[in-house]
Amino acid sequence: MRSQSSALLILLVLASCQTLTPEKEPAATETTEVVEEAPLGILLNGKKQLFLAKADSAKIADYDNGLRAVEETGILESALNVGDEAVAFTLKNQVGEEVSLAELLEDGPVILTWYRGGWCPYCNITLAFLQEKLSEFELEGAQLVAITPELPDSSMSTSEKHELDFDILSDVGNKVAREYGLVYKLTNVVAARYQKGFNLHAYNGDETDELPLAATYVIDMDGKIRYAFLDVDYRNRAEPSKLLDVLNNMN
């Protein structure tokens, strides 16, 4: 039976991150008092501060340089944005069923969110938080769909671990993400850290060292993008409250 406490769920996610990522910080105990009512950004910033407190200066510098390199590609300007037509696609979900954006839009607006992988603590926190807000999205008539470049086995593991009730679509090779202009290549230094830390190539089934931005779109039934969250820093994510505001204004 699913826990009714979002605080407990998020704390479990934080604890689990210790074995999943190259940023192996201990779980936070000092954040327990604010989790119950905290927006997603506070939880993510708490995770970031734990990393900064524990990581050595070389790792911090490598990751910061990696983020600057992504920004310098101009990806934020070239990615699909508000007013653009969403690119149609069909991908398989975590149980091997084909999911079509066109078919989803027949039933209402779609929240389309990308995550880097189950190895990413910020992704895990976000997915768990989105699960807790799922019923609120559905009350607005929207469907939530997440996309990852991971192989289906990896996406299935993430879905089962966090008891997710929404589709996780496997975009192997970042084919769909590329159509949305969201794909970037890790710097060699960061790629080496990821490969040594948790074997990114095994998760994604390739050696491209490419990942998507942790972007989120709200797409209306006509296929138009009504909201876009684009940020080169994977530690920042779209707030569910903002998504709900957008959906409410569309009704």
Image: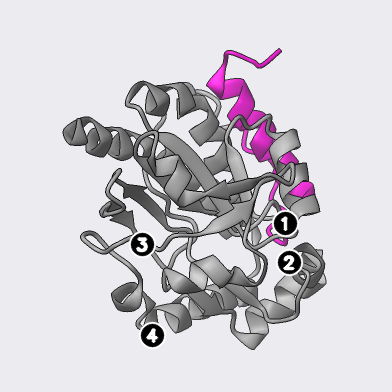
Mark 1 lies on residue:
21
SS for tag 4?
A: helix
The residue closer to the viewer here, 188 or 77, is: 77
- Asked if residue 221 is positioned above or below residue 20 in the image, the reply reads above
**Which quadrant of the figure has residue 133?**
top left
Residue type indicated by callout 2: Asn
- Distance, label 3 to label 4, CA atoms, is 14 Å
- Distance, label 2 to label 1, CA atoms, is 15 Å
Q: Residues within 10 Å of mark 2 (few under 14, many from 20)?
A: many
Q: Residue 10, image x and y in percent?
A: 59, 31
Residue type indicated by callout 4: Glu
SS for tag 2?
A: helix
Residue in the picture at 67% in, 66% down: 172
- Asked if residue 130 is positioned above or below residue 114 in the image, the reply reads above
The residue closer to the viewer here, 161 or 52, is: 161
Check residue 19 for magenta coloring: yes
The residue closer to the viewer here, 44 or 118, is: 118
Q: Earlier in the sequence, mark 2 or mark 4?
A: 4
Mark 3 lies on residue:
230
Mark 4 lies on residue:
72
Q: Earlier in the sequence, mark 3 or mark 4?
A: 4
Residue 204 shows which numbered tag?
2
- Distance, label 2 to label 3, CA atoms, is 22 Å
In front of the other: label 2 or label 1?
A: 2
Q: Residue 20, image x and y in percent?
A: 76, 52
Q: Residue 251, image x and y in percent?
A: 20, 30
Residue type indicated by callout 3: Leu
Residue in the picture at 56% in, 40% down: 127
- Asked if residue 64 is positioned above or below residue 226 in the image, the reply reads below
Residue type indicated by callout 1: Thr
